[in-house]
Image: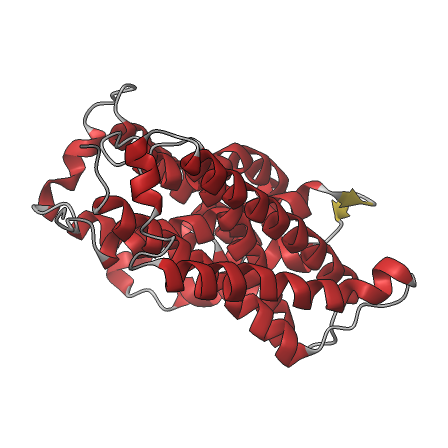
Amino acid sequence: MQTIEWGFLIVNYLFLGGLSAGLFFVSALATYLQENGEPAYPRIAKYGAMMAPWPVALGSFLLIFDLGNWYRFYKLFIVFKWQSPMSIGSWLLLVFTGITFLAFWAWLPEETRHRLFSLLPKRLAFLKRFDVNIDAWKRPLAMAGFPFSIGVGIYTGVLLGAVQARPFWNTNLVAQMFLFSAFSTGTAALILALSANKKELDFRQLRFLYTLDICFITIEFFIVLPYLIHGKLSVLAVQEALKLILGGPYTLTFWLFFMLAGLLLPLFIELWEMAPALFQKATIHHNKPLASVAAGLVLLGGYLLRYIFVYAGQISAFK
């Protein structure tokens, strides 16, 4: 039995990094799609940009404390090693986080920005020079951050797949699975945010989010299946590793809480919500409590996916 060296700090980092990647990806897509020179889905674009920086910032903070001597984290940025997944990931996170904060600033309402700077003490008054309007940067930042959001979403899976001694991780499908899980969790978080808004619901924007999430969940499901089939047809060590979720200690968590509750149930709910628009060209249902449950289940499933892979992967090993 292998020891567990990566714990909940890593699970939280992988989930939070993926969540930010998904939020920014959907926000960038909503910003890029234009109508009359403006974002076609402005509320999605704004909410995604405003929410994206915080999960990845918190996740990176947690990751630093998992390094052991956390105060030496700066050494990751002294040099760039293209052969090292850790070095590539560190710089990728740094650039992506910077872009998300710039996008947040671009979408921040002017009165809010002025109010924040008015709270500065006199000795920090020089910082008021940064109270500038970068509204024109919204679309360029969305386009610049688009590939980085994809990179961060993939990287959370590549980080595991790079450890070849763990057969549970040793396939490119893990990176793909984590990528579409990240997109789905970001979309679900935006569904929650739009549903919680007290203003009149914009069913057109909700329909866009439901359509995206249905696509992401479906793709994720059809990546999980090949992962299982590939594992059963692979070498003995991989087949043994899969037993951790096929009768082993993670079976219930994987099949009941991730596959059923985290993927299939929210997919069914979102398809039901979309049914009028799909078959009758009418307005979507959008039952707020039901939509919130579906979005919450997607977020739970995204978290459990990372929990299962981090823990099960560490107790699998080639013999």
Residue 228 in the figure: left or right of residue 48? left
177 and 184: which one is in front? 177
From the top left corner, tell me how far across and down residue 198 is, in percent: 65, 79
From the top left corner, tell me how far across and down residue 238 is, in percent: 33, 36
Q: Is residue 95 above or below residue 260?
A: above
200 and 242: which one is in front? 242
From the top left corner, tell me how far across and down residue 233 is, in percent: 44, 32
Q: Residue at x 59, y 69 (%)?
A: 294
Q: Is residue 206 above or below residue 226?
A: below
From the top left corner, tell me how far across and down residue 76 is, in percent: 20, 33
Which residue in the rendered view is the most extreme toward the right?
280
Residue 110 occupies which quadrant of the picture? bottom right
Q: Residue at x 55, y 59 (%)?
A: 263
**Quadrant of the drawing holding the C terminus:** top left
Residue 317 occupies which quadrant of the picture? top left
Q: Is residue 307 above or below residue 272?
A: above
Residue 21 visible to the viewer: yes
Q: Residue at x 80, y 68 (%)?
A: 284
